[in-house]
Image (tube, rainbow, N blue to C red):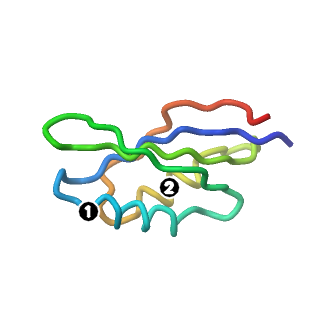
Amino acid sequence: MADVVASIRVMPDSADRDLNELMDALKAAVPAGTKFQKFELKPIAFGLKAIMATVTVDDSEGGTEPVEEAWSKVPGVESVNVEATGRAF
């Protein structure tokens, strides 16, 4: 099986949310079989920033769903969306 690299946008529930704490919580919630790569902050509007995460998952059925489900349950997360995927080489 090949690996798939996914770029995932995580929106906090508030512009006042401590993003460092939220990133720590997201990293702790990475499910088994998923390799965390990095976080980047992307300004959205009015002081709100999105957390752009890069992870590597197997290309098996379900792909990024375990990550999306796990991160959606983290307190302080408003939404989780896959922005892009591609094969890892």
Residue 69: mark in rendering: 2
As measured in the structure, the alpha-carbon distance from the residue carrying label 1 to the one carrying label 2 is 21 Å
Q: Which quarter of the figure is the C terminus placed in?
A: top right
Please tell me which residue lies in front, 65 or 52: 52
Residue 38 left/right relative to 78: right
Please tell me which residue lies in front, 75 or 47: 47
**Could you tell me which residue is drawn at 33 percent across and 43 percent down?**
50
Going by the numbered disc 2, the residue's amino acid type is: Glu
Q: For mark 2, does the 10 Å Cα neighbourhood hold few (<14), some (14 to 19), or many (20 or more) residues? A: few
The image position of residue 61, as x and y in percent, is: 72, 43
Element class at badge 1: loop
| Image marks 1 and 2: residues in contact by CB distance under 8 Å | no
Which residue is the site of mark 1? 18
Element class at badge 2: helix
**Could you tell me which residue is drawn at 42 percent across and 41 percent down?**
9
Q: Residue at the far right: name it.
A: 1
**Could you tell me which residue is drawn at 73 percent across and 32 percent down?**
87
